[in-house]
Image: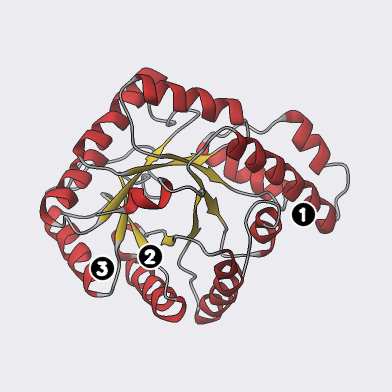
C-alpha cells in the first residue's frame, strides 16, 4: 500500500503514463523519453495493459526495465477484459515478483469491434471487484482507479458514474486519476461532487499535452473529451508541426498552472511515450535535476 503518499506531501505528486511499444526499437525510444522525464523526479511511472495477452508481457517488461534502469517506482494497469479471476491473480503475482509496487485497476474498454464490455466467464464485470481482490489478496500493492470529469461514456448520467466511482474507492482504491480533459472547470466540478459524496482520497488530473490537432481530435473523439473551440482554432492557425506543438504546450502550461493554483494534489501526464511536450510543460512548474 502507500500510493496515496505521493499526493499528500507538501509538493505536488508527479507521474507519467507509458504504453508498451510493439517493437524493440520502440522500446529503446521509450527509454530515451523516460531518461528525459526522470530529470523531473517523478514519483512513479505507469504502463498500460493490453487485454487478452496482446501486450501484457511487454507491459511487465517495460516496467521492469524502467524500474531497474532508473530506480523509480512503477505501476501496471490491469483490466478485467478477457481474463478470469485466476488469470488476474497470476498476473498480479508475476507483477509483484518483477518489482511492480502499484496497480491502476480498470474495468477496461471493449475489444476492437465490440460496442460494449462483455464479462469474461469466471472473470469480473466491474473495476471495484478487481480493486477488492487486490486489497484482499495483495495488500502490499497500492491501487489507483480512473475518474471521469466529463462522465464515463457508458454511464447513463453523472450521478450513476459517481456511484460507480465511490464503489471503487470504498473497495480500497487510494488514488483517483482522471481521464484527460481540456476544460478545467469540468475537473473542478467533478472534484467538488466527489468530495460531497464522501470521497476523501487524492483526485489527480490526467493531462495530455497536445502536439498535433488531428491526433487530439481522434483521441478526444474516442474518449468523449471536449476540446475548447478557441484552442482548436489556435492549433489550426498554421499547419506546421512546430506551430501546433508550441500552441499545444502553451495551452497545457496554462491548464496545469490553473490546476496547481487551485490545489490539485499532483498531475499525471499521458506522455504517449515521448518527452518533449511534457518536458516543456514541466519546465514552468517543476524543478529538474
Q: Nearer the viewer, residue 275 or 139?
A: 139
Q: Position of residue 233 (x, y in %)?
A: 81, 35
At x 36%, y 65%, the residue is: 54
Q: What's the distance in space between the residues labelled 3 and 1, CA to CA?
A: 36 Å
The residue carrying mark 3 is 95
- In terms of sequence position, does the residue under pointer 2 or pointer 3 come before the other? 2
Most distant residue in the front direction? 10
Q: Is residue 22 left or right of residue 138?
A: right
Numbered disc total:
3
- Please report contact status of discs 2 and 3: CB closer than 8 Å, yes or no: no
Residue position for label 2: 74
Judged left or right of residue 112, residue 117 is left
Q: Name the image quarter holding the N terminus.
A: bottom left
Q: CA distance from mark 2 to mark 3?
A: 10 Å
Which SS class for mark 3? helix
Q: Position of residue 283 (x, y in %)?
A: 69, 57
Of helix, strand and loop, which one carries label 1?
A: helix
Comparing 91 with 214, the one in front is 91
Q: Position of residue 164 (x, y in %)?
A: 29, 29
Q: Which residue is mark 1?
A: 245
Whether residue 200 sits left or right of residue 229 in the image: it is left
- Is residue 270 in view? yes
Amino acid at each position: 500500500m502507500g500510493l496515496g503518499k505521493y499526493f499528500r506531501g507538501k509538493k505536488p505528486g508527479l507521474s507519467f503514463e507509458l504504453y508498451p511499444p510493439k517493437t524493440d526499437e520502440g522500446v529503446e525510444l521509450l527509454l530515451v523519453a523516460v531518461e528525459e522525464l526522470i530529470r523531473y523526479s517523478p514519483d512513479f511511472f505507469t504502463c498500460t495493459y493490453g487485454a487478452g495477452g496482446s501486450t501484457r508481457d511487454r507491459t511487465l517488461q517495460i516496467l521492469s526495465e524502467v524500474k531497474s534502469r532508473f530506480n523509480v517506482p512503477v505501476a501496471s494497469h490491469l483490466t478485467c477484459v478477457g481474463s478470469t479471476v485466476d488469470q488476474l491473480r497470476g498476473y498480479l503475482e508475476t507483477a509483484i515478483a518483477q518489482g511492480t509496487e502499484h496497480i491502476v485497476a480498470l474495468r477496461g474498454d471493449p475489444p476492437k469491434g465490440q460496442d460494449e464490455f462483455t464479462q469474461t466467464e469466471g472473470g469480473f464485470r466491474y473495476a471495484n471487484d478487481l480493486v477488492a481482490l487486490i486489497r484482499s489478496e495483495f495488500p502490499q500493492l497500492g491501487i489507483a482507479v480512473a475518474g471521469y470529469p466529463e462522465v464515463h461514456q457508458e454511464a447513463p448520467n453523472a450521478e450513476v458514474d459517481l456511484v460507480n466511482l465511490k464503489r471503487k474507492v470504498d473497495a480500497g482504491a487510494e488514488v483517483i486519476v482522471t481521464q484527460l480533459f481540456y476544460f478545467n472547470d469540468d475537473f473542478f466540478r467533478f472534484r467538488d461532487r466527489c468530495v460531497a459524496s464522501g470521497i476523501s482520497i487524492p483526485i489527480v488530473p490526467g493531462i495530455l499535452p497536445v502536439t498535433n490537432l488531428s491526433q487530439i481530435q481522434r483521441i478526444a473523439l474516442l474518449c468523449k473529451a471536449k476540446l475548447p473551440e478557441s484552442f482548436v482554432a489556435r492549433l489550426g492557425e498554421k499547419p506546421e508541426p512546430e506551430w501546433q506543438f508550441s500552441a499545444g504546450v502553451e495551452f497545457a502550461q496554462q491548464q496545469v498552472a490553473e490546476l496547481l493554483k487551485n490545489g490539485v494534489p499532483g498531475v499525471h501526464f499521458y506522455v504517449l511515450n515521448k518527452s518533449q511536450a511534457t518536458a516543456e510543460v514541466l519546465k514552468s512548474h517543476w524543478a529538474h535535476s
